[in-house]
Amino acid sequence: MSKRRVLVAIALVVLAPVWGAVVVSAAPVENDTYAVAQGTSCTEIQPVTNESQPAEAFYDYRNPNTEPNSSTFSSFGTTEYQESSTSTLLFYEGSEGASIVLVHGELGDEDGGSTLTMAFEGLPADGAWVVEDDEYSGRDDDWDLGDTTASIDWMWG
């Protein structure tokens, strides 16, 4: 039987066409399969793989204070996976290990706003949050991070 890395993601989602993401990375893994479980449903997921770049480069986060900059707080590296009014979860295997990537909405689609509540269990203890979109003073997102768990209330407009 193959080894499995199972991410238990419980998401209460109200979607709107906006963008944002979070990336959590861990050391290189030797798993054969990734899976996402929500409620009683469990689905195997194929990772996006590019061993030449780390998750931060793949995500390519830009805002008014980054170089290159953008007037938006957005991912420019994940446009191929973005979709209006949709939250996307993917696994990324890059040069520094495996990552979970979440993208909300589509770059350039500025209509509306929403909230997403996520709970993660079974995250690697040696992992790190390498990109937190919308890191700025006064943000209204709530991040409760444990050693192998995370509870996140993410709001955007």
Image (spheres, rainbow, N blue to C red):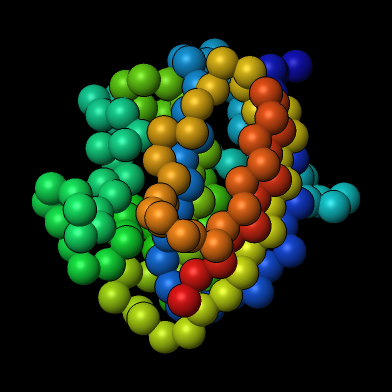
Q: Nearer the viewer, residue 46 or 73?
A: 73
**Count of labels shown?**
0
Q: Give how far across and how far down residue 22 sits, in percent.
A: 47, 47
From the viewer's perspective, is residue 19 above or below residue 51? below
Q: Nearer the viewer, residue 85 or 146?
A: 146
- Of all residues shown, which one is farthest toward the bottom? 111
- The quadrant of the picture occupied by the N terminus is top right
- Of all residues shown, which one is farthest toward the front? 138
From the viewer's perspective, is residue 144 above or below residue 127? below
At 32% from the left edge and 21% from the top edge, which residue is drawn?
A: 95
* Residue 130, quarter of the rendered image: top left
In the visual, does 42 lie left or right of 65? right
At 42% from the left edge and 86% from the top edge, which residue is drawn?
A: 111
Q: Is residue 131 visible?
A: yes
At 27% from the left edge and 67% from the top edge, which residue is drawn?
A: 72
* Residue 80, quarter of the rendered image: bottom left
Q: Give how far across and how far down residue 49 sits, in percent.
A: 37, 33
Q: Give how far across and how far down residue 41 sits, in percent.
A: 81, 51
Q: Is residue 91 visible?
A: no
* Residue 109, quarter of the rendered image: bottom left
- Of all residues shown, which one is farthest toward the left? 68
At 46% from the left edge and 40% from the top edge, which residue is drawn?
A: 23
Q: Nearer the viewer, residue 74 or 40?
A: 74
In the visual, does 91 lie left or right of 152? left
